[in-house]
Image (cartoon, rainbow, N blue to C red):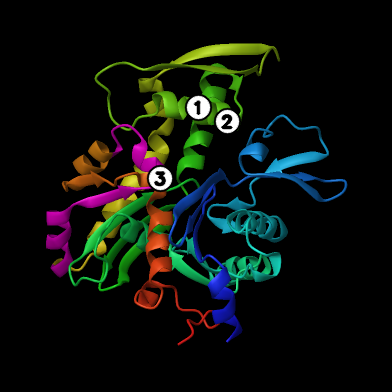
Amino acid sequence: MFDKFYQRFSKDIGIDLGTANTLVYVKGKGIVINEPSVVAVNQRTKQILAIGSEARNMVGRTPPHIVATRPLVDGVISDFEVTEAMLRYFIDKVHAETYTFLRRPRVVIGIPSGVTEVEKRAVQDAAINAGASQAFLIEEPMAAAIGSRLNVQDASGSMIVDIGGGTTEIAVISLGGIVVSKSLRIAGDEMNENIIQYARDNFNLLLGERTAEEVKFKIGSAYPQEQALYAQMRGRDLVSGLPKEVTISDTQGREALMHSLKVIVNSVKSVIEEIPPELISDIMTKGIILAGGGALLRGLDKLIGEATQMPIIVAEDPLTCVVRGTGVVVEDLEQLKDVLVPTEFAKIPR
């Protein structure tokens, strides 16, 4: 009875709790928040100083007692209390005009497909402690498929590759369930590390994480480009200790990223090998859908297409596929309850 009372005043929300960015969908409104999953904490007082975009601007620029950190690593919670504070911040931001004691939304959260029961429970507990009345979980590849407008409850098969910040999710979906899946802890963040390691090994240059990410945006590619691209890498010379600038081309960028890209491509191929023959023909007709921020890497569709001999389609606005999928579920929880991860502590009231 109380849940129904709170639902009259609360705004049910869908959350893509990503390693790099957190996106929030509000029922009836759409996507209202898209901020980095970064929290700045004062280590002396344990006080949270900033969350989201403001905290991201502090990364690498803080005094020793202030740490700007990501509370999620590889798609799972690494710091429970900070994650809880971040979720509370986003829930409060959505309900800014509602009375405090009435903020008890139902929340649908996207999680990687390979997480353990303990990790699932941690996400739900964090959401409940942050003010949710109920917390439902949906696997990210399922949410991404729904957000890409695939009919996941149909008997025909669909295949999606969701490349986020911390994880790459590969899944084949049919009849509202995941038939075959693979979750890799290699994605956008690992590609940034590849660039940092390449600069260290080839130029004795120490790069910051944000600089590496900017280089990836400017020249990152998975396939040879028609026109050469160049970017400047600025960091510290490991030999002299002085500032140093190096110009890098897209060819060198591909060389840096190739290790991670090969792992992703080989994993896609290994999932295809496990697909039941009845579903292979459906996927050959529909193609493989690419979602997540990694789908925007230049030429990645060509690289995967060449390796798998299948058509590759980049989803419309791939960055928001997961949160749009959680939004579709939030709009009709009763009808889509079968696509949620079954848990004993989040029941949809009849």
Question: Dot 3 surroundings within 10 Å: few (below 14), some, or many (20 or more)?
Answer: many
Residues at badges 3 and 2 in contact (C-beta under 8 Å)? no
Residue ID for mark 1: 214
Secondary-structure class at tag 3: helix
Sequence-first disc among 1 and 3: 1
Could you give the CA–CA distance between mark 3 and mark 2, rounded to whole angstroms?
19 Å
Give me the residue at 69% from left, 34% from top.
Answer: 58
Residue span colored magenta: 278-300
Could you give the CA–CA distance between mark 1 and mark 3, rounded to whole angstroms?
17 Å
Q: Amino acid at mark 3?
A: Leu
Q: Depth check: give the residue in front, 91 or 202.
A: 91
Quadrant containing the C terminus in the rendered view: bottom left
Residue ID for mark 3: 319
Could you say where residue 164 lies in the image, as x and y percent from the top left? 44, 47
Secondary-structure class at tag 1: helix
Residue ID for mark 2: 210
- Residue 241 visible in this rendered orientation of the protein: yes
Give me the residue at 60% from left, 53% from top.
Answer: 72
Q: Is residue 261 above or below residue 201?
A: below
